[in-house]
Image: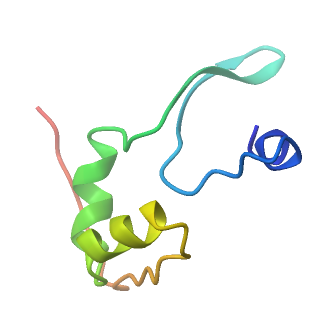
Amino acid sequence: VLEGMIKEGRPYLGVLYAGLILTADGPKVIEFNARFGDPETQIILPRLTSDFAQNITDILDGKEPNITWTDKGVTLGVV
């Protein structure tokens, strides 16, 4: 999908969340969302050490964001 967008002159910078299902023929894409999935976001965002707002601004301005992460582990339980 991303390669196709680049070939069409429409490169995508940002979050692309894929909803997948595993079938007997292998994984299949159910949907794409231009957002973080939840509860995945609850694990990902606390590990971000760079400025989230600046990263978004850079993406909107067509610049490559400077994204940095902590190496510390994170756990999550969802009820």
Q: Residue at x 41, y 84 (%)?
A: 68
Where is 47 relative to 3, above or below? below
Name the image quarter holding residue 1.
Answer: top right
Q: Residue at x 53, y 44 (%)?
A: 16
Q: Is residue 51 left or right of residue 13?
A: left
**Which of 63 and 79 lies nearest the eye of the viewer?**
63
Q: Give the color scheme: rainbow, by chain, secondary structure or one colour.
A: rainbow
Where is 5 relative to 66, above or below? above
Tell me where residue 72 appears, x and y as whole percent: 30, 83
Where is 76 relative to 35, above or below? below
Tell me where residue 73 appears, x and y as whole percent: 30, 75
Q: Residue at x 31, y 83 (%)?
A: 50
Name the image quarter holding residue 23.
Answer: top right
Tell me where residue 43 appears, x and y as whole percent: 28, 58
**Which of 59 and 48 lies nearest the eye of the viewer?**
59
Q: Is residue 78 left or right of residue 49?
A: left
**Which image quarter holds the C terminus?**
top left
Where is 57 relative to 8, above or below? below
Q: Is residue 52 left or right of residue 35?
A: left
Tell me where residue 64 appears, x and y as whole percent: 55, 76
